[in-house]
Image (tube, rainbow, N blue to C red):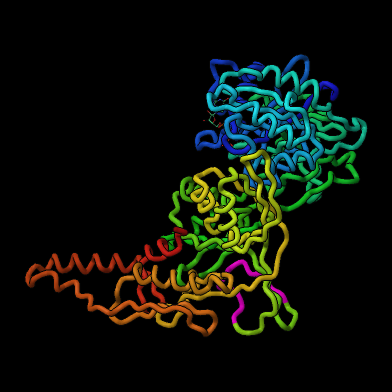
Amino acid sequence: TDPALIRNFCIIAHIDHGKSTLADRMLQITGVVDDRSMRAQYLDRMDIERERGITIKSQAVRLPWDGHVLNMIDTPGHVDFTYEVSRSLQACEGAVLLVDAAQGIEAQTLANLYLAMNADLHIIPVLNKIDLPAAQPEKFADELAGLIGCDPSDVLRVSGKTGVGVRELLDHVVQTVPAPVGNADAPARALIFDSVYDTYRGVVTYLRVIDGHLGKRERILMMSTKAAHETLEIGVISPEPKPSDLGLGVGEVGYLISGVKDVRQSRVGDTVTTVVKPAEEMLAGYDHPRPMVFSGLYPIDGDEYPELREALDKLQLNDASLIYEPETSAALGFGFRVGFLGLLHMEIIRERLEREFGLSLISTAPNVVYRVVMEDGSELTVTNPSEFPTGGKIAQVFEPVTKSTILAPAEFIGAIMEICQGRRGQLLGMDYLSEDRVEIRYTLPLGEIIFDFFDQLKSRTRGYASLDYEPAGEEESDLVKVDILLQGEAVDAFSAIVHKDKAYTYGVDMAKKLRELIPRQQFEVPIQAAIGARVIARENIRAIRKDVLAKCYGGDISRKRKLLEKQKEGKKRMKMVGRVEVPQEAFVAALSTD
Ligand code: GTP
């Protein structure tokens, strides 16, 4: 295709502002999916049955429109995946900024807009859901125009549901989004913006050609790893993959399959070139996304450890950002320390492990990565609280901080500031987007955000606040490790790194919780919370004499045996901490966040 006839664009929006529904209408109106095979959220293919075929998540669709080729590139919407969003944006020249006409601008609207502006994209502001009785297109067109600096009359109005305005939007894309420019004679350079593992075909790589040409049956080179592969299939997606004999040229968007079995061999952000005529420089900005949140994952049934390892290995084939290493906990047995991009990523992985691999897991409370500088100048990186050094030789502790943006109706400013202040936030600034809507910016420690911050924010603002955050380096902080001891023995799974001012509350809460969760034993069990050798909280579990046989008044021997058997069974699900028997459920309950 002549690059002059190509338009590459994405749709960016806050969650639920209607991205998928609008995409559905575009597929239908351009005739790519006929009315008969249309189903809602056509491109959302994440549910289990669809996870098998090659068409798992159609990350880019080619739409014919008015003699042109439109490539619509899908972007994941959540903060955890910002890196992937920014790579998708770099495959486009334009972005449709979609805003719910009944809701207005939200935190992810802003975050995505800034990413798109950084990528120099042409922005098309669009209000969606104008069919809703509650829509206020005038008000929000003003808000949107103020934000991007255009005239309110330039804001398009559509309904993804009824289809109103969608044709005009497609025309507008053709007229205003710049055609891709690239050098057709230069060595090939293509940007990988997504990479998906398929059980039958191996890794499917989604890419955008910047310069040159990629053909079928060509030796290709991944520029970051220098690994060479052979292209087995190359083509476009419309809406299913269609192999192309011509390959892909400048500005084109499509997929390739080279038989690699692991997405780490074909990473998002990497540049593909050819072996015969390799490019000299890779495309800018390639980055390994770094895990920000860590948690220990342990099988509830210790025998399932090999299955857990296998499941993680499999998930990693499809998720280059997932990292893990074996770890042993005195309390929980054999498991893994797993690094995630953020809380959502963590929830997804955990859910997939349980749902797709049938595992039952205990996960330890999530924590961030700390950098500890010792007095002798040595440094260590702590991803597991129980490895935090104890003793007086720590000089400094650094924790990751974020720049967080909260959008909410102005009436909630007080509540929001209270929450942020309570979590060691530093106010960076505040702006009114309209007379009743504010944007509040804070520097907040990531460690505070991953601890039910969003839930609290939602409940204190009756669900009206939205949040977005981005990493903003690290800051020194007064952090200590609080250990929880049963009968004088520290339980590694309960150790936490908290701010000095919160250590006492953490210790008291945890000790209370455990007193209720751990059954009485034959002897008294003290529960202590301690910082180093200093005890900051204490509870006691009083002793009982547990005599199950006393319940069976004499005679029935088989009944007695049954009870003994049962007690043995129960014991299997007990973990020993020193001499103390702790039921599995106590760990699960104590480690759950609520
Ligand atoms: P995520 O994929 O979760 O980010 O959401 P999304 O932005 O893709 O939104 P989706 O298309 O799933 O729409 C969210 C909700 O809004 C759904 O219940 C849709 O039915 C509804 N919706 C989307 N577009 C319109 C519209 O134009 N009018 C009305 N009335 N409802 C709409």
The quarter of the picture where the N terminus appears is: top right
Image: magenta residue range: 379-390
Residue 190 at x, y percent in the picture: 81, 38
Q: Which residue is at a point 60% across and 45% down the rendered structure image?
A: 410
Residue 365 at x, y percent in the picture: 51, 62
Q: Is residue 204 left or right of residue 215?
A: left
Instruction: Classify 469 as above or below 434.
Output: below
Magenta run includes residue 380: yes
Task: Determine the image quadrant of residue 88.
Answer: top right
Does the image show residue 130?
yes
Task: Determine the image quadrant of residue 327.
Answer: bottom right
Residue 228 at x, y percent in the picture: 79, 45
Quadrant of ligand 1 in image: top right
| Residue furthest left as drawn | 555
Q: Is residue 525 left or right of residue 18?
A: left
Instruction: Classify 236 as above or below 395.
Output: above
Q: Which residue is at a point 41% across and 76% down the rendered structure image?
A: 577
The quarter of the picture where the C terminus appears is: bottom left
Q: Is residue 349 left or right of residue 75?
A: left
Question: 353 or 460: which is nearer to us?
Answer: 460
Q: Which residue is at a point 63% across and 57% down the rendered structure image?
A: 323
Magenta run includes residue 531: no
| Residue furthest right as drawn | 185
Question: 132 or 359: which is nearer to us?
Answer: 132
